[in-house]
Amino acid sequence: MKEIKSQKSKKILKKIFIKLCRLMGYEIIDQNNFYVPTSNRNLNETLSIPGLKSINLPLGEVKITRKVTSLDVIIRTCSSVNMLTQNKKRIFEKEKIEYTLRSINSILRSVSYAKNYHSNIDIKITVIDHNSSVENLDKIKNLLENSSLTFKLLNLDVAEFQDRIKKINEKNKETTANQISNMSNIYKSLLESKLSKDLIYFVEDDYIHELDSITEMLFTYERVASLTGNELVVCPTDYPYLYVRVENTNIYLGEKYHWRKINETLCTFLTSKQVIDKHWDKFLSMCTFEHYPFESPLHEIYKNELCISPIPSIAIHCTNINSVFGLSPNKDWKKIWDKNKV
C-alpha cells in the first residue's frame, strides 16, 4: 500500500515539475524513451514553435526575434517553351506541361503540409503564365482550384514590358523573343511582390519540391534571421555547379537540414520584402538588360545579403541530366518525380 502511494506521489510531483518547466519556458527530455514531456512530442518530431523558438538538439533553443507573418509564392509558368536557352531535352524527356504540373503540384502539397506547423502564416499562391494553351491553362487552373489554397492566375502581357527591355544584350547580340518573355515574367513577378507584406518565394515551373520544403524554408528563415539579426535569401536547390570550384563557406543549422552560404543562384529563391525594396534597382536590372551570366545582378546582391542553400537539396531543378545547373547530387530524382504525378 505504501509503495502505491509512493508511486502516485512521484507521478504528481513529476506532473507539477513538467508544468513548472512549461511555465518557465524550459524543455526537459527523457533520454530513455526519446520523449519531451513539456512539448508532449517525441524527439524525432518537430519541436520548434513558429514565431517563438527554434529547437535543435543537442544545441537547444534559439529565441525567434524575426517572426515570419506571411508568404507569397509567385510561380512563373510557360508550358509552350521546352528549354529557354538550349535545345537539350530535360530529364525524363516529357512535354513541358508535365514539368509545370508536377512543379505546381509539389508546391501546393508542400504549402498544405507547411500549414500543419505554420497555421498563423498567411500563404498565397500567384501563377503568372505566358503563352500556355487553353488546354494547359485549364489543367493548371484545375490543379489550383483543387488545392483549397488562396490563389490567383494571371496571364502575362509581354507588350506591357517590351519597351523597357533592351534589345541588345551584354554580348552585343539581339535579345531573343524567348528571353524577352522570360524577363517580362520576372518583371511582372517583382511588381507583384510589391503587394507582399513579408516573405516572397519566386519560383520557376521546373522545380519539383520535397513535401517539407516550404516548412523547412520558413523555420530556417526565422532561425537564421534571428541568429544573424539580418534578412537573408534562401535558395531551395543544391545546384551541382556550386561544387565545380572550391570555395570557403559557412554552415548553418536549419530545422531538419544543414544549410551553407553560397554566392550564386538561378532565378528561384525566397527572400523578404525588405530585401526586394532595398535592392530594387538591381533586381529590376535583371529584367531590363540581359546580363552574362543572366543572374549577375543577384550575385551582386549576395555580396551584401546572406544567401544559403540546403544540403541535401529540398527541390530539384529538372534540366538536362548533364547540366551543371540542374540535378542536385545525392538525391533520388525519380522518387521526387513520381511522388508529384498529377
Image (cartoon, rainbow, N blue to C red):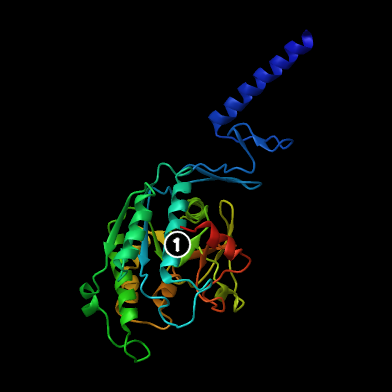
Q: Nearer the viewer, residue 205 or 66?
A: 205
**In x, y percent, where is residue 84?**
40, 78
Q: Nearer the viewer, residue 218 or 225?
A: 218
In this rendering, is residue 243 above or below 43?
below
**In x, y percent, where is residue 53?**
52, 43
Amino acid residing under circle 1: Ser
Which residue is found at the position 23% from the left and 70% from the top? 157
Which residue is found at the position 42% from the left and 42% from the top? 119
Q: Is residue 193 left or right of residue 40?
A: left
Which residue is found at the position 29% from the left and 59% from the top? 153
| One can see residue 61 in this view | yes
> Which residue carries the number 1 mark?
103
| One can see residue 235 in this view | no
In this rendering, is residue 199 above or below 9?
below
Q: Is residue 194 left or right of residue 301?
A: left
Q: Nearer the viewer, residue 14 or 44?
A: 44
